[in-house]
Every structure is written in C-alpha cells, then in structure tokens.
Image (cartoon, helix red, strand yellow):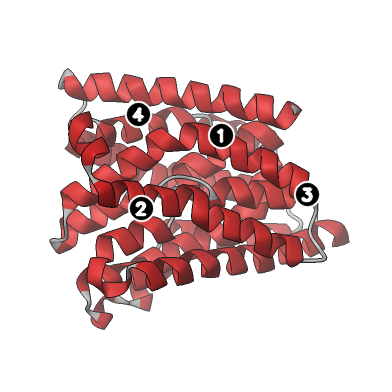
Amino acid sequence: MEILTILIKQIALMFVLIMIGYVLCRKKLITLQGSGEMGKILLNVVIPCVIINSFWCERTAEKTATLLQGSVIAVVVMAVAVIISTLVYGLRDGVSCFSSAFSNAGFIGIPLVQAVLGSSAVFYLSLMIVLVNFLQWTYGLYVLTGDKGKMKMSVVAKNPVVISVVAGVVIYLMNLPRFAFTDTLISSITAVNTPVAMLVTGVYLAQSPLSDIISDRRTWMVSILRLLVIPAVSLLVMKLFPFGTQEMKVAIMIAAACPVGSNVSIFAQQVGASFRDATNQVCLSTILCLPTIPLLTLLTTVVL
C-alpha cells in the first residue's frame, strides 16, 4: 500500500503541473512551438542524463542478471503492445495504431518510477525506453505513412536515447567511479524532468476543446486499449516469467500502463497524418491514466 500511496501523490503532483501547462498555454504564455522546443531539451539532454544516471552504479553479478532479465521482459511487453495494436488497427488507422502501441514511458513513466521506486529503478526500463524510441522511428512511421522507406536505421542510430543507453552500458561494464561534480551536474539536469515534461503535456492538452476530446468514440477506444487492455495482457504475460523481482515488474508495468506517447502528435504533424486525432488521443489517455495507473500497479503487486 505504501507504493500505491506514493504513486497517487506523484500522479496528483504531475496532474497539477499539467494543469499549469494547460493554463499557461491558454493564456498564450507558452506556445505549441515553445513546448516543442522544451520537448527537444527533454529528449536530447534530460532523459539521456536520467538513463545514464541509472546505469552509473557499481557493477555486480546480481545487477547484471537483473538488467538482462528486465530487458527480456521489456522486449516481450513491447511485443504485446505492438501485436495487439496492429491486430486492432493496422494500417487502416495508423494514428490509432501508433497511439495504442507506444506509451509515454519517457516523459511520464520515468518520473513515476523514480518517485515510487527510486532513481536506480530506471535501470529496469532502459531497454524498454530504447525499444519505444526505436519502434516509433521505424514501425511507427511506417503505420502512419504506409511507406516502408520511412524505416531508416540511420535515424534510429542517432537517437539520443539510444546513444545514452549505449553510453550507460559502457559506463556500467567499465565500472567507472562517480565523482562529486558529475553527481551534482546530472542531479541538476534530471531534476527538471518531471516539471518540464508535465508542462509540455499540459500544452498538448490545451490544443483541443475538452468537448471534442470526450465526444470522440475512437479516442475512447484507443485509451481503453492503451490504458487497460494492453497493460492487463502484459501483466498476464509477466506472470509467466519465472524470473525477475516484483520491483522490476512493477517498474515495467508502470511504463506499460502510461498514456499515449506525445510523439504521435509530433510525428502526425510532420508526415501529414491527423494531428487532431493524435492530440485528442494523447489528451484523453493522459486524463484517464490518473486512476488506471494506480489500479494496475496495485494489481501488479497483488498478482506477482
């Protein structure tokens, strides 16, 4: 129950930050373009530092085994999300397929896991975060455009999140010592992750009238799939694994239960897909995740 209490408090805090972003956007103090620039800072600097920080610890046989086990579970959980989304939507509705397949594991998942389980628990999510980014830039672009030529590995290889995980693994394997200066620097950067990510989410929420968001049946279906169906199936699959600690599986479940990733709006705008549908799906699922994430986390602690 302690985990549930911490999670509810953190989600309440994040919701307040989202509302601040919403109000600031409505007052024209933050623009959509400005939130995009903030998102670039998160993607290129803050989240990579969070990931590197989680790897920068003493190497032990136990931690190495944990990393490998978490990676296997993360791969399977991501496969579940992509398979279910493809079966339900496929290419006939690329925006909904993208939205239901990829959670906001970076902007919302990492802050929640940090608050509930500690910064070191991001270690469990490393490969999952990479997979989300890898699949968004390959399979995600494919379902949005129907063009297989969009799946360029050269673009994925330059992704800062992918690079940060590679750097983190190298640091971990080399067992590099930590220094006071680097600790202070990384701590200062990672501290802005939650507030900036939530302000950006609030700006997205302000892009559509609430009446439009809640009246769209397709948006509700995507939210149900993303927030309930996929996490529930993922939980059943995780129960089959004979390895992995409960803490690890809770961390992965929190990431898997997160709302629609905001990248769908960015990608939809870039490739000419429906920006409105994408934004509505991000917004509604973000609102609805306030009760669903604690519920699924509690269920995970009971079932596993």
Task: State the residue position of label 4.
Answer: 199
Indicate which disc, 2 or 4, sits on the residue closer to the N terminus: 4
SS assignment at label 4:
helix
Residue at 32 percent of width and 34 percent of height:
200
* Residue neighbourhood size for the residue with mark 1, other residues' Cα within 10 Å, grouped as few (<14), some (14–19), many (≥20): few
Secondary structure beneath label 2? helix
Task: Name which quarter of the figure residue 298 lies in.
Answer: top right
Q: How many marks?
A: 4
Q: Amino acid at mark 4?
A: Leu
Residue at which label 2 appears: 222
Q: Amino acid at mark 2?
A: Val
Whether residue 61 can be seen here = yes
Compute the Cα span from label 4 to label 3.
31 Å
**Alpha carbon of mark 1 to alpha carbon of mark 4: how far?**
23 Å
Earlier-in-chain disc, 1 versus 2: 1
Residue located beneath label 3 in the image: 246
* Image quadrant where one finds the N terminus: top right
Using the numbered discs, state the Cα–Cα distance from disc 1 to disc 3 in whole angstroms: 31 Å
The spot of residue 167 in percent (x, y) is 58, 60
Q: Tell me the distance, in whole angstroms, between the alpha carbons under discs 3 and 2.
A: 28 Å
Question: Which quarter of the figure has residue 145?
Answer: bottom left
Labels 1, 4: front one? 4
Vertical order, 102 against 80 (above or below)? above
User: Mark 4 or mark 3: which comes first in sequence?
Assistant: 4
Which residue is drawn at the image coordinates 44% and 52% (left, top)?
A: 226
Whole-number angstrom distance, CA of label 2 to CA of label 4: 23 Å
Judging by the rendered image, the residue that carries numbered circle 1 is 185
